[in-house]
Amino acid sequence: MTAGAVVIIGAGHAGYQLAASLRQHGFSEQVTLLNDEGHLPYQRPPLSKAYLKGTGGPDSLMFRPEKFYRDQNIDLISDRAVSINRAARRVLLASGTSLDYCHLVLATGARNRLLDIPNANLDSVRYLRTLDESQSLRDYITAGQRVIVIGAGFIGLEFAATARAKGLEVDVVELAPRVMARAVTAEISEYFQSRHAAAGIRIHLGVQVTSIESDGSKVTGVSISDGRHIKADLIVVGVGVLPNVELAADAGLPVASGIIVDEHLLTADSNISAIGDCALFASPRFGGSLRLESVQNATDHARCVAAWLTGDAKPYDGLPWFWSDQGPDKLQIAGLTTGYDRVVVRGDRAQAAFSAFCYRDEQLVGIESVNRAGDHMFGRRLLAAHGSITPEQAANPGFDLKSALT
Ligand SMILES: Cc1cc2nc3c(=O)[nH]c(=O)nc-3n(C[C@H](O)[C@H](O)[C@H](O)COP(=O)(O)OP(=O)(O)OC[C@H]3O[C@@H](n4cnc5c(N)ncnc54)[C@H](O)[C@@H]3O)c2cc1C
């Protein structure tokens, strides 16, 4: 808890939400939000969805207009933190100035994992995390171009679906044996794989790009590990992210696959919290430590820290949920669908509306829904309350899910 200035490093989903929630909780001390991107704080999910398709301008992505920060007395500063002096409780900025804090929050997010092969620095090798990257892809892609997407994760597949809808020739190259393998069940992977294939996207599984060919300035194609060559004008890389932990590590705070925080999202220094994509947090709900990359995680972390800073200290207990829009399909995930030992399908895959209920030791741990928003909302409510239904009930189309919520 603090009675003084709060400095937030990073104005993404987590940083923005924390500043807004502090004011909602009546926090009256100074709040400074450090923003190192050349835009007002904005939402990332549309960058690989509606925005990439051409819907709306940059303003449509902003959480709030500039006036909001003025009205709420939030100091939104365009600068980058370069180091933390924990003894002096001071953050040094790239501009040479510094900010003193009573409590510091690291909301530094994550950055693209870069491809490490020759020619990966060509202009026609692109990534998709920031508004600038999405804008430049949106301006660049036109019907008839040939694009290779490296990585069949959420962002790679969302981009692939949009590019295909815009008339590009799309090949997706993925090292794992199925799409979104780290994140979803085989049932969901198979469904999306067949939907993307039906849309004309060629998916190459169990292989990787071994070299990028160019004419000296532009990409002309790639070689893949099974010996084939694929022609291309553009490569979009979606091979995951690296959490931005360096500021914390340089300040002597423990980091691993994220900045290590306890169940209150505090680092080893009780004057410093870490939230969102950069935080590896202790989870009483799931046991062990988790680092998640989702809007829910970033915003619920922010709300938890805002409550803690205003005297309502509770351990973080948010239920993870997530969504991904790929072509005409909406995938929604409630809970953590890892470590399951049984999957029960409810609904009709042929009708493009079904859910995979995931169980561990007969206990429901998560639900992955395709175009079944009702199942998703049910899962969020039931799992948040640590509830379950039996696999037999889940599989029975006549079983009324709502009856399990009362
Ligand atoms: C294209 C795309 C689509 C997505 N789609 C979905 C989706 O459909 N559903 C979903 O749940 N999630 C989605 N996500 C994930 C979601 O956007 C992230 O989990 C979320 O943005 C995390 O918020 P954050 O604030 O922790 O980090 P970020 O949004 O990464 O924000 C961190 C900010 O900190 C800044 N920063 C870093 N270091 C410093 C420094 N030293 N000084 C100052 N500033 C600094 C960064 O530049 C950045 O602006 C998507 C992500 C992307 C990229």
Image (cartoon, grey):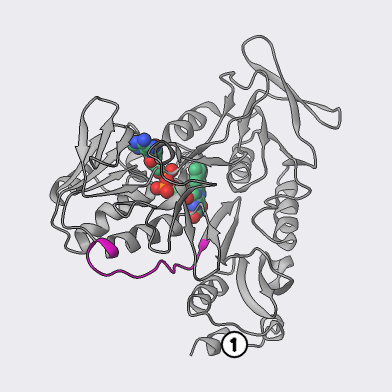
Q: Residue furthest front?
A: 87
Give the image location of residue 207, x and y in percent. Answer: 79, 37
Q: How many marks?
A: 1
Q: Amino acid at mark 1?
A: Asp
Give the image location of residue 161, x and y in percent. Answer: 62, 44
Question: Which residue in the protein does label 1 denote?
Answer: 400
Give the image location of residue 272, x and y in percent. Answer: 32, 50
Range covered by the magenta-colored residues: 308-321
Would residue 4 be counted in the magenta stretch? no
Residue at 57% x, 35% y is 113
Q: Which of the 4 image quarters holds residue 118?
A: top right
Residue at 35% x, 44% y is 60
Label 1: how many Cα within 10 Å (few below 14, some 14–19, many 20+)? few
Residue at 49% x, 70% y is 284
Q: Residue furthest top?
A: 216
Give the image location of residue 53, x and y in percent. Answer: 51, 40
Q: Is residue 122 above or below residue 52?
A: above
Q: Which of the 4 image quarters holds residue 62?
A: top left
Would residue 309 be counted in the magenta stretch? yes
